[in-house]
Image (cartoon, grey):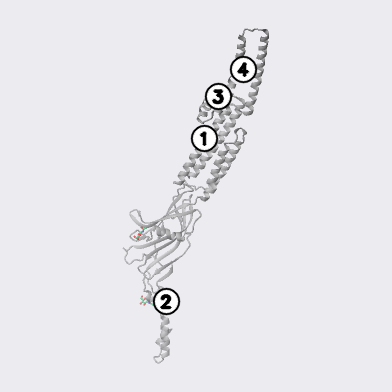
Amino acid sequence: MCISSCLSMSPHTMTLLLTCTLFGVGYGQLNCSFDILINNLSFPSLSIRPVKNWRTATEIQIEMALYNIIDLDTSLQSFTTLVWFTMIWNNEFIQWEPQQYCSIEKIFLSNVSYWQPDLYIYERIQSEDKSPSVPFYSIQYNGLTTRAMPLRIVSSCTVDVFKFPFDIQKCNITFGSYIHPVQQIFMYTSLNSAEVLSSTKSVIVTNDNWDLLSITVTNNTLDIKGEIYSTVSYEITIKREPAIYIITLIAPACFMVILDLASMFIQMDSGQGLGFKITIVLGFSVLLSILNTMLPTSDMVPVLGIFCCVVMAVMVFSIMESIAISYMLILSKSQSTVPSWIKTWILRYLARALFFKEKFFMEYGIKISQTETNVNPRVLEEQSMETKRKPQNDKEDKMVKKLLKMLLQEVKKIHDKIVDSNDMDDLKTEWHAVALVLERLVLLIYLLTVAILFAVVLIIWLT
Ligand SMILES: *[C@@H]1O[C@H](CO)[C@@H](O)[C@H](O)[C@H]1NC(C)=O
Ligand SMILES: *[C@@H]1O[C@H](CO)[C@@H](O)[C@H](O)[C@H]1NC(C)=O
């Protein structure tokens, strides 16, 4: 409008000229719109790599900061992360002088119109892209194009749960081009591992389950059938937060073991020990079912699983011992003596090996001699024989002797009865002794197994 009015102006009207000069300044201001810049730029074809000589490789600079570790699924072996990702490359066909365009140095465009590298994440296992969409990229006057976007990556990751819940996992994320070999697209990162880690630490949102330990970045190449592809790979090392597992699994399991150990000291003939132990095993199996939901399902069995299995086995073993002992106590009511092989092996050798004190042998040894022979009456008889040898052979003496013998027999009977009833009450029979020895043996085996188990598990977890 101004141009037409200026062309048609009459040279005599000075005021009009003045206004036209002013309008001309206004016209210059219109160069500040992005539209003019876009319309005046000649863009290369959308789908072709923007190089003037096809032999030139497009160099793509990659930057990544880990924003969030969303999940590490041990059964699917998948690692889900949200990263902030940036690619920078040069578009040789785009160039403008910022002075000509009102000092515009950079424009932001929606990603429909330009070539961009075919970014491929090699470990990605989910095709559906749930990344937040930020479809813009920026172009500088010298052709440097930046594509920055958040990426939600579900990648495959080999999870090793052997040390669960004290495990450290390493997952890789590799960026590269899927179709362009290294002669066409060269990917690299200018940041080293320490810089990536520090930029990540400044943005990362902490996850309750996982702690970021380190990020290692490397420029890599991938050789596929002689064709070499340029890649950049990030190795992310994370550590599981064990606190929740210690509180909900490991500590209760240890308490159960201690309880089971304590139950060994319940008086064995009361019959309550067995019920108590079974209750503990029930409680432990509840714990096991919780563990089952928490434990990562993977072909490698975690140490914690083995630990629980052995603890269960030990508990069952101690229940078996309780049953055996209660059976022995029943036996002791019907039989006062044990088979001779048990006597030699268990009561003599095993008891010695298990450091039973002399008192034990005395207590049960006396009983054994009582049932075998009654020494005291014999001594009495011998004494009476001695009296026989004396020359006095009166009838009265004979009568007295007979009476004495009868008396002796009666006393013996009463004595035996008292001994029998004592056996019933105190259960101080040989079976009882066998039960005591076995109980100590099982306690020893139990303690040894649990101690070795704890030591092994601790060593595995701490190394
Ligand atoms: C638009 O581009 C042409 C050359 O393609 C140039 O001569 C002209 O000055 C440019 N226009 C502006 C406003 O810069
Ligand atoms: C990757 O390569 C680029 C260019 O070749 C180099 O500047 C950078 O330091 C390399 N990065 C690493 C981590 O090796």
Q: Is residue 34 above or below residue 189?
A: below
Which amino acid lies under the numbered mark 3 shown in the image of this protein? Pro
Where is mark 4, residue-wise? 377
Give the Cα distance between marks 1 and 3. Answer: 24 Å
Q: Regarding ligand 1, which quadrant of the image does it lie in?
A: bottom left
For disc 2, does the CB lie below 8 Å from ligand 1?
Answer: no
Q: Earlier in the sequence, mark 1 or mark 4?
A: 4
Give the Cα distance between marks 3 and 2. Answer: 111 Å
Where is mark 3, residue-wise? 339
Q: Nearer the viewer, residue 5 or 84?
A: 84
Give the Cα distance between marks 2 and 4. Answer: 131 Å
Which amino acid lies under the numbered mark 4 shown in the image of this protein? Pro
Give the Cα distance between marks 2 and 1. Answer: 90 Å
- Specify the label residue 85 is tagged with: none
> SS class of the residue under badge 3?
loop
> SS class of the residue under badge 2?
helix
Q: Is residue 189 above or below residue 431?
A: below
Residue 122 location (% of width, % of height): 41, 55
Q: Nearer the viewer, residue 47 or 247?
A: 247
Q: Residue at x 42, y 64 (%)?
A: 147
Which amino acid lies under the numbered mark 2 shown in the image of this protein? Cys
Where is mark 2, residue-wise? 32
Q: Nearer the viewer, mark 2 or mark 4?
A: 4
Residue 302 location (% of width, % of height): 48, 45
Q: Is residue 195 visible?
A: yes
Q: Residue at x 67, y 18 (%)?
A: 410
Q: Earlier in the sequence, mark 4 or mark 3?
A: 3
Q: Residue at x 35, y 62 (%)?
A: 59
